[in-house]
């Protein structure tokens, strides 16, 4: 009997074309990626089932779209599949991979996310190579959790854990895991694991909901944080600089949050770091909760899940 894989098409550059001088998703979901796979030398004899809950560029995605994608998986009997492959866009790939890892933490088969920096008809496209790797991983491995095979602009094809991948590097079209801790690399067509797999999965049944009441702030010199309207938010996440430092204005926001009963988080700091910088220490004294040893993308995703029922 053939192995079965569920392919969830959601849009992104990998499902786009050029129209009126700009890159846009096609009017109707297209499955060119599957046609290319079935015609390539690396193909395997697989039965693919298709769903397409969304058809959007990832920069246009909403939290509701992410929940709809997760819900579309929930409606399927995934026990009949060897794995799941999703398409997605690169612009919000880091955030989506982390969030979907938490939303699908009750699924016992590998979930692969495939993206591309270029449309499939562009000679620079690596979408097919990423998809081939996703299929090979599903068929040859028995891991649970979310993984992202991605070819960087320098040619290396890494496989990232969904809870470790970061947003793509600006102007480089490359993806990296936090601390460069990628799970595996494809070398001469073989998946070479870098470290033992620790599945980020539980048996708890997920409810596929997310909170949209979290304000995400980035540290920018000159930004007037005092003018930010905090009404309607349950929590604020303030991204620190790489040293765990934040500007003095973070303390002002922390005090405003404390007054309004809003949770205020700062992240992230290495677990081996011994002390805060002055601005961070002041914010913590003002009520900030500091999160350690996680990427900003993972923290934001966890907060959306953790605060969904608060």
Image: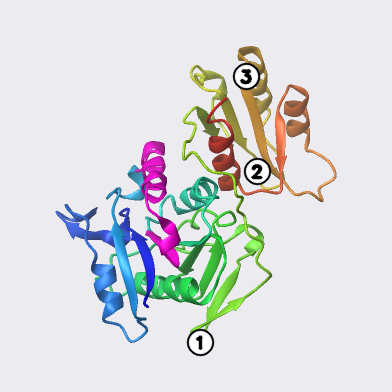
Q: Where is residue 276 in the image (x, y as percent from the top left)?
A: 79, 38
Image: magenta residue range: 61-86
Which quadrant of the structure image shows residue 77?
bottom left
Report if residue 75 lies within the magenta region: yes
- Could you say where residue 210 lies in the image, as x and y percent from the top left? 48, 35
Question: Which type of secondary structure does the marked residue at label 3 adopt?
Answer: helix
Q: Can you identify the residue that label 2 sits on?
A: 241
Q: Is mark 2 on a helix, strand or loop?
A: loop
Q: Count neighbours of disc 3 (C-alpha within 10 A) and say few if under 14, some if 14 to 19, many if 20 or more.
A: many
The reply to whether the magenta stretch includes residue 258 is no
Q: Nearer the viewer, residue 108 or 14?
A: 108
**Residue 257 appears in the picture as rendered:** yes
Q: How far apart are marks 2 and 1 (CA)?
A: 38 Å
- For disc 1, the neighbor class at 10 Å (few under 14, some 14 to 19, many from 20) is few
Cβ atoms at labels 3 and 2 below 8 Å apart: no
Tell me which label, 1 or 3, sits earlier in the chain: 1
The CA span between labels 3 and 2 is 21 Å
Q: Name the residue under label 3.
A: 257
Can you see residue 220? no
Q: Nearer the viewer, mark 3 or mark 2?
A: 3
250 in relation to 72, above or below: above
Rate crowding at label 2 as few (under 14), some (14 to 19) or many (20 or more) other CA atoms within 10 Å: some
Question: To which residue does mark 1 refer?
Answer: 188
Quarter of the image containing the C terminus? top right
Mark in front: 1 vs 3: 1
Q: Closer to the observer: label 2 or label 1?
A: 1
Q: Which residue is drawn at 41% across and 71% down?
A: 130
**Residue furthest left in the image:** 20
Q: Tell whether 134 sits left or right of 306.
A: left
């Amino acid at each position: 009997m053939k192995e079965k894989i569920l392919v969830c098409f959601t849009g992104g550059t990998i499902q786009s074309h050029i129209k009126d001088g700009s890159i846009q998703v096609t009017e109707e979901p297209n499955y060119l990626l599957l046609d290319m796979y079935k015609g390539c030398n690396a193909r395997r004899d697989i039965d693919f089932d298709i769903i397409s809950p969304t058809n959007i560029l990832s920069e246009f995605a909403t939290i509701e779209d992410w929940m709809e994608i997760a819900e579309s998986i929930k409606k399927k009997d995934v026990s009949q599949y060897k794995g799941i492959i999703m398409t997605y866009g690169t612009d919000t790939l880091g955030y989506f991979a982390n969030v979907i890892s938490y939303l699908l933490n009750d699924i016992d088969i590998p979930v692969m996310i495939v993206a591309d920096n270029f449309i499939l008809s562009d000679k620079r496209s690596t979408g097919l190579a990423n998809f081939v790797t996703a299929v090979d991983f599903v068929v040859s491995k028995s891991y649970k959790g979310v993984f992202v095979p991605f070819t960087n602009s320098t040619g290396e094809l890494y496989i990232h854990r969904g809870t470790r991948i970061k947003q793509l590097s600006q102007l480089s079209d490359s993806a990296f895991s936090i601390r460069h801790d990628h799970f595996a690399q494809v070398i001469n067509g073989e998946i070479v694991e870098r470290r033992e797999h620790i599945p980020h999965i539980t048996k708890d049944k997920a409810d596929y909901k997310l909170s949209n009441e979290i304000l995400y702030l980035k540290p920018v010199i000159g930004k007037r944080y005092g003018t930010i309207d905090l009404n309607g938010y349950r929590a604020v996440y303030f991204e620190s600089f790489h040293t765990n430092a934040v500007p003095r204005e973070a303390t002002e926001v922390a005090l405003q949050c404390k007054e309004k009963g809003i949770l205020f988080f700062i992240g992230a700091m290495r677990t081996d770091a011994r002390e805060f910088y002055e601005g961070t220490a002041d914010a913590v004294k003002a009520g900030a909760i500091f999160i350690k040893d996680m990427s900003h993308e993972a923290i934001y995703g966890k907060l959306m899940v953790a605060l969904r029922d608060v």
